[in-house]
Image (cartoon, rainbow, N blue to C red):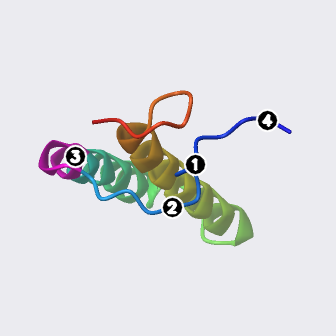
Amino acid sequence: MTQMHESTFNYLQPTDKQKEDMAVVRSKFMELVFGMDSFIPDGPDKTYLIRKLRECAMWANVAITRNADGTPRT
């Protein structure tokens, strides 16, 4: 089994700087979604696209709070 850091499935309280970075990243994803909204027809593909962008935003938060090996970024 792949070795994971013991905190991999635990909540990490972000630092104040990390919270600021997360807010900026969230804002950029929202800009992308709202910026393309009028160009992408409503339907299941658009719904899927928005869900994937939400997923990417969540993974961005993980990347902000964890190092590549899964250890908490401080």
Magenta region, residue range: 15-21
Q: Which mark is residue 10?
A: 2
Measured along the vertical axis of the image, is residue 37 above or below residue 15? below
- Image quadrant where one finds the C terminus: top left
Of circles 1 and 3, the one toward us is: 1
Q: Answer yes or no: do the residues labelled 1 and 2 have beta carbons within 8 Å?
A: yes
Residue 38 in percent (x, y) is at 44, 60
Q: Which residue is mark 4?
A: 2
State the separation of the CA atoms marked 1 and 3.
28 Å
Residue 39 in percent (x, y) is at 49, 54
Q: Answer yes or no: do the residues labelled 1 and 3 have beta carbons within 8 Å?
A: no
Measured along the vertical axis of the image, is residue 26 above or below residue 42? above
Mark 2 vs mark 4: which is more N-terminal? 4
Q: Which residue is mark 3?
A: 24
Residue 25 in percent (x, y) is at 30, 45
State the separation of the CA atoms marked 2 and 4.
17 Å
User: Residue flagged by tag 1: what amino acid is it?
Assistant: Glu
Q: Is residue 5 left or right of residue 38?
A: right
Q: Which residue is mark 1?
A: 6
State the separation of the CA atoms marked 4 and 3.
32 Å
